[in-house]
């Protein structure tokens, strides 16, 4: 692998879109130009969830990951990043694809926000019923 070569993956969740690049390195994760710990406000569960794909294949210290993420909230962004990293790993080594699939890391979560319908207060909430 040349010095500026990388593996690319795209992940989406709710309104968030993440583009991940995997480089050979020491295990640093950068999100939108900031270290992951700083971007996620030191939230340990989100940081652990973010590095799940690398942990499953046992390559946490082998790659540096740079992520550009936009839209959505922090949780949706982390899920999008997770999918993007998993896709980049499967692009790098096709033999690891089965391992990632078993851990269900290559599946996009299809749940989206339901649209508001006319005549209702929100997507499903109706006006309060009055008998009299």
Image: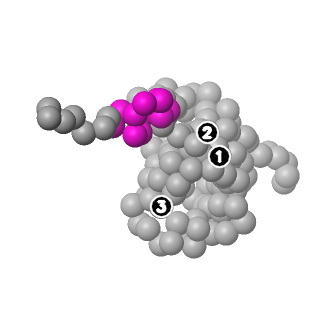
Q: CA distance from mark 1 to mark 2?
A: 5 Å
Residue drawn at (54%, 70%), measured in percent from left and top? 37
Q: Name the foreground residue: 75 vs 122.
A: 122
N-terminal label among 3 and 2: 2
Q: Residue 41: x percent and y percent? A: 51, 72
C-alpha distance separating marks 1 and 3: 15 Å
Secondary structure character of the magenta stretch overall: loop
Marks 3 and 2 in Cβ contact (< 8 Å): no
Secondary structure beneath dot 3 equals helix
The residue that mark 1 highlights is 18
Q: Which portion, as a residue range, is magenta? A: 114-125
Between residues 58 and 80, which one lies in front from this camera angle?
80
Name the residue that disc number 3 marks: 47
Q: Position of residue 103 (x, y in %)?
A: 41, 35
Using the numbered discs, state the Cα–Cα distance from disc 3 to disc 2 in whole angstroms. 17 Å
Q: Which residue is mark 2?
A: 11
Residue sitting at 44 percent across and 59 percent down? Answer: 46
């Amino acid at each position: 692998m040349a010095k500026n070569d990388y593996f690319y993956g795209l992940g989406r969740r709710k309104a968030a879109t993440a583009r991940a690049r995997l480089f050979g390195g020491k295990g640093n994760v950068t999100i939108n130009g900031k270290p992951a710990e700083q971007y996620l406000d030191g939230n340990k569960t989100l940081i652990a969830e973010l590095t799940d794909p690398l942990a499953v294949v046992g390559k946490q210290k082998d790659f540096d990951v740079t992520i550009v993420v936009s839209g959505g909230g922090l949780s949706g962004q982390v899920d999008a990043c997770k999918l993007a990293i998993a896709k980049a790993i499967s692009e790098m080594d096709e033999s690891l694809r089965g391992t990632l699939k078993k851990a269900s890391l290559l599946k996009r979560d299809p749940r989206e926000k339901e649209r508001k319908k006319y005549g209702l207060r929100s997507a499903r909430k109706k006006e309060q019923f009055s008998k009299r």
